């Protein structure tokens, strides 16, 4: 099995662990990288976890916030 993991240095100036979920959603709704958009990555993560019977309330809340921002952009 091949997997891809992301790690973060909590001592880094780029560490964003203290941001409010709304601020994180703003960034995820607009950001993209080599593997696609962050919004799509989040959606895929939430969907796959749910398919495995894993419900993460924090990720679902973040997914809802990102989806709302994307919906606002589309209007």
Image (cartoon, helix red, strand yellow):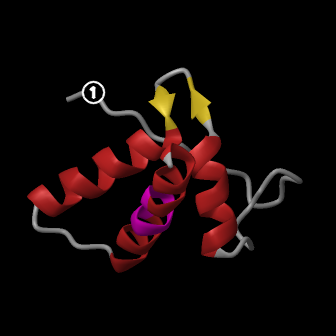
Q: 24 or 70, which is in the foreground?
A: 70
Q: Residues within 10 Å of mark 1 (few under 14, many from 20)?
A: few
Q: Position of residue 1 (x, y in %)?
A: 20, 29
Find numbered disc 1 in the image and state the secondary structure of the residue it sits on. loop
From which residue to which does the magenta span run?
Answer: 63-67
The residue that mark 1 highlights is: 2
Q: Is residue 64 magenta?
A: yes
Q: Position of 32 compared to 12: left or right?
A: left
Q: 43 or 13, which is in the foreground?
A: 43
Residue lying farthest front?
75
Q: Is residue 65 magenta?
A: yes
Picture residue at 65% right of the left edge, 57% below the top: 26
Q: Quadrant of residue 60?
A: bottom left
Q: 13 or 42, which is in the foreground?
A: 42
Q: Position of 43 compared to 12: left or right?
A: left
Picture residue at 47% right of the left edge, 45% below the top: 39
Picture residue at 11% right of the left edge, 59% below the top: 52
Q: Position of residue 17 (x, y in %)?
A: 70, 67
Residue lying farthest top?
34
């Amino acid at each position: 099995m091949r997997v891809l993991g992301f790690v973060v240095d909590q001592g880094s100036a780029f560490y964003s662990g203290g941001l409010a979920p709304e601020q994180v959603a703003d960034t995820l709704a607009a950001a993209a990288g080599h593997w696609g958009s962050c919004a799509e990555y989040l959606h895929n993560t939430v969907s796959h976890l749910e398919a495995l019977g894993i419900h993460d309330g924090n990720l679902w809340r973040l997914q809802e916030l990102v989806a709302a921002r994307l919906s606002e952009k589309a209007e």
